[in-house]
Amino acid sequence: MSDVTKKPSDLRKNHNSELIRRMRGGESLTAIDSKASWYPPRPIIQKDYKEMSRLYNRDVEPLQEQQDEQRAAGPEAPSSVLRFPKG
């Protein structure tokens, strides 16, 4: 009897029996090699603050400097992600 004419339950039983046999034999059950789907880590992209300043026609400061200034100003200072100095 071919796989086309077998019942789905029989196919599932055969598949499960095959998996159990492979597990007992110590074979790997993976369908593909794990290295075949591995992607290298993405590079860290640094912002070009000079280019951002040129693009927005303003001085743009790195976020860490802004956070340090806000901490020094006290808790009542408004927080923002990117600040453009007035001028």
Image: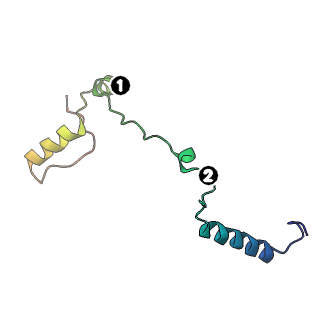
For the point 35% across and 25% down, the residue is: 55
> x, y percentage for residue 80?
25, 46
Q: Is residue 8 above or below residue 31?
A: below
**Three-letter residue code for mark 2:** Ile
Q: Quadrant of residue 46?
A: top left
Residue 63 lies in quadrant: top left
> Residue 55 bears which disc, if any?
1
Residue 8 falls left or right of residue 82? right
User: Which residue type does callout 1 highlight?
Assistant: Leu
Q: Is mark 2 on a helix, strand or loop?
A: loop
Q: Which of 40 and 43 is in front in this view?
A: 40
Towards the viewer: 22 or 16: 22
Position in image of residue 41 (x %, y %): 42, 41
Distance, label 2 to label 1, CA atoms, is 47 Å
Image quadrant holding the C terminus, namely top left
Q: Where is residue 61 in the image (x, y as percent from the top left)?
A: 22, 33
The secondary element bearing badge 1 is classed as helix
Front of the two marks 2 and 1: 2
Sequence order check, earlier mark of 2 and 1 = 2
Residue 47's x, y, as percent?
A: 32, 32
Residue 4: assigned label: none
Mark 2 sits on what residue? 32
The local crowd at label 1, few if under 14, some if 14 to 19, many if 20 or more residues have their Cα within 10 Å, is few
